[in-house]
Image (cartoon, coloured by chain):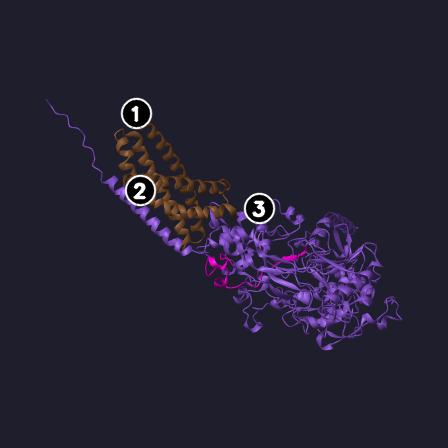
Chain colours: A purple, B brown
Amino acid sequence: MRTSARLLLAACWMAAFAMWETPCSAQAADASRFAHADSSSRYVHWIDLYDVDNRRITPESTRPYSPLNTCGRCHDHEVISHGWHFNAFSDTVPAGRTSEPWIWTDERTGTQLPLSYRQHSQMFDPRDLGISAWEMTVKFGDRVPGGGFAAAAEQPSAEDTGQADRRPISGVLENDCMVCHAASGGYDMTARREQIQLQNHAWAATAAIHLGSVNGRADRLPDNFDPADAAQAGKLPQVSYDSRRFDPAGKVFLDLVRKPDNNACYQCHSQQDLSASRSLRWQHDQDVHLRAGMSCVDCHRNGIDHHTVRGFEGEVHPSGQSVATLSCVGCHVSGDVAHTDPRIGVEGLPVSARPGRFGAPMPAHAGIPPVHFDLLSCTSCHAGPPPSDEPGAIMTSLSHALGTATHRPDDQLPLLRSPVFMPLSDTQAVADAAEDRGSAQAARRKLHPHRVMWPAFWGQLDGERIVPLHPESVYTWTRRALRVRRDFVTEVSAQGTEAFNQKVLLALAAIAEQIEGTPVYVSAGKVYRADASREQLLSEPLDEQAMVAWPVGHDVRPANWALGAQGCSECHRPDAPIFTGTLLAAGPAPDESPVQVTMAGLQGIDAQRQRLWNQLFARRDQFKLILVASVAITGLMLLAIAVRWLARPVAQPTQEVQP
Amino acid sequence: MKRWTGVVAIVVLVLLILTTTVLAATAWGSMLRVGHMGSDALVAHMAASGVFVLLVPVTAVIIPRWAARGGATAAGQRGGAIGLAGMVFWCWLAASWLTMATMLASMVQNLGTTGLLTMLSIHRWSGAATVIALLLLIVVGIVSGRSRRAPAD
């Protein structure tokens, strides 16, 4: 009896304790839900794999593994999925500084259309053009690490283009952690790209780390294919797992690193210089930081939220953490000025906010007037190709799918040009967001090296505005008129202006049958449209702001290769390309008198005044001699008068004479 | 000879006043904002500084001689005004020298950013002192001129 009473009492206590404890426990469980090794050592990942239905993968399984269900068991996928690489689709994320757009390129129609879900200047939101997340995934899926638009549930509200959302068949292109976190050489981007091009989106992650071979292709399955139908399920691609990858307990070793290797970054962030002064890859020294032993993620780092630091001056990190010392100026010059008293200087900074991370050298900038630091970003002088009389062509991973083995002619669309020295072209929204941040605003006005492109697309006039039409619809409507088999440039533009005019007129007429407004073609800063009789093709230049530009920060050159290291005349001479360089608009259309704009024009500087200013530097050395003479003569005069004053006779006090 | 010295001195003084006016006008905005000069102001300031650099040593040589030969002998007997004018003149010359020296130091490309900012700051204030000294010199000159004419009246 007494025992029963004790048990009852204990049970009551436990129940009471459990009720009292529950909220705290839940909180603690939330905080510790995901695994933490909490060590600097590398955690060895012998792990179970899970498929999209959370079923454990065995060597006999035929379904692909799901990164979300496998990695997400121990890592907070929800938090990770809001990082910079995945959040473009989100309306709640600030646009941030302008970055390279997704350039929808269709060589058959001469289209190079800059798209961005972020509200960047001169770029078009795919949703406004009726381009669905599915279409974006098909077009650009092989250039994203998964997630974002590739995994988005949202669909465009604009007109339906008739393109079915085939994700029930292809599966979702989930955030694939291994794209970045696989040890160098452990991830096969080519295999991933191949699977994505076959619309085997859910199978891409499995194929890329060679856990097994994937047989079948989702793109061959009809739109009405029902993957839930057991009778048809066998037609979906199947995985044959390599049983040697599994240990006796059924676990698989994934060779992972916490800090992604440079090679992982290069998959999407490489560029190929095509300018006349280009140096071949074996002649090129790469970024000086990498040569010093650093890696991309030493500066472009992130926490579990994956808000990768972009590293520009005035950057505000979404986490609220200061990232000032991860920018050029913060690391090499000033540290985190927001945390210090400017009167004290660097010595007044806490150690963590001081410049000099990784032993970064402190530049003297001897003889460079400080006004330059108010007008130029660090990258203007130190990064990217030096200014040239005519900015050269460039290819990038995101725009030209660098990394895939293919033949790329130098004039392959999209046509990009670099370097162009101009102030940042952020949208007003970005400017407003930074209104109360003096350094961010000041940084916006500085010159930065940019890459630029001119949109080329088929669109319709909407009042004064030109709205691009859905590129796939354009291809369908103009296919018969243009009769291009592969390349608009070689098959239409290269045939001469007359042939171009004729074909474009036919294409515009074909589009006019499908839309209500006036159809136009835009290329290289000009708009082409049919005259009233529809027999002549008229062209007129657009505003120069039709150009799309985004700043670049790499490759950083050694200090003695910086612009100005050899003297003022590198920039301050009448023909200095940083001001006089001329940018010729480039696009698929033939153009005998292309739109031209000088760097000075883009910088808002009067060319005449700039020339006058630079002429003042022409006799600078002689002026220095005159100045030395002048200072010497004046100094001697002052010395002489000082000596005279000191040697002046001192009046003797009058002695009183005693009578 | 004496007459020519007087003409040259007057021409130099007029040029100096004009040049200093341009320098002061173009620098004033930047001094108030403690920022850098705009492009037009900068071009004008640079051009005027070239003339200023030539005029200062000429002024330093000519004006004391002219003052000593002419007005100073007459007015020197009256003491006050010319004594003060001389003092202001040498203050002006010292401020001008400092202004030019900081300009030179900034151009020899040995100083780092901190040094250049210090030079800029000194240049700014010595430039202001030069302008004020020149203004005082003009005022004192006018006052001493009137006092010389007074007995004739």
Q: Nearer the viewer, mark 3 or mark 2?
A: 2
Q: Is residue A564 magenta?
A: yes
Instruction: Provide residue A89's location: percent of width, then percent of height.
Output: 73, 56
What chain letter is assigned to the residue under label 2?
B
What residue lies at 33% left-to-right and 45% top-to-bottom? B58
Region rendered in magenta: A546-574
Q: Name the N-terminal-most of marks 1 and 2.
A: 2
Q: Which residue is mark 2?
A: B62
Instruction: Provide residue A3's location: percent of width, then percent of height.
Output: 77, 52
CA gap, disc 3 and disc 1: 64 Å
Q: Nearer the viewer, mark 3 or mark 1?
A: 1
Horizontal side, residue A469 vs residue B132: left or right: right
User: Chief secondary structure of the magenta span?
Assistant: loop
Q: Which residue is mark 3?
A: A438
Please state the total of marks drawn on the protein image: 3
CA gap, disc 3 and disc 2: 50 Å
* Amino acid bearing label 2: Ile
What residue lies at 26% left-to-right and 33% top-to-bottom? B73
* Amino acid bearing label 3: Gly
Q: With respect to residue B145, does A448 lie above or below?
A: below
Which of the 4 quarters of the picture holds residue A215? bottom right
Q: Which residue is mark 1?
A: B152
* Amino acid bearing label 1: Ala
SS for dot 3: helix
Q: With respect to residue B149, does A593 lie above or below?
A: below
What chain letter is assigned to the residue under label 1?
B
> Can I make out residue A166 in this image?
no
Which of the 4 quarters of the picture holds residue A282? bottom right
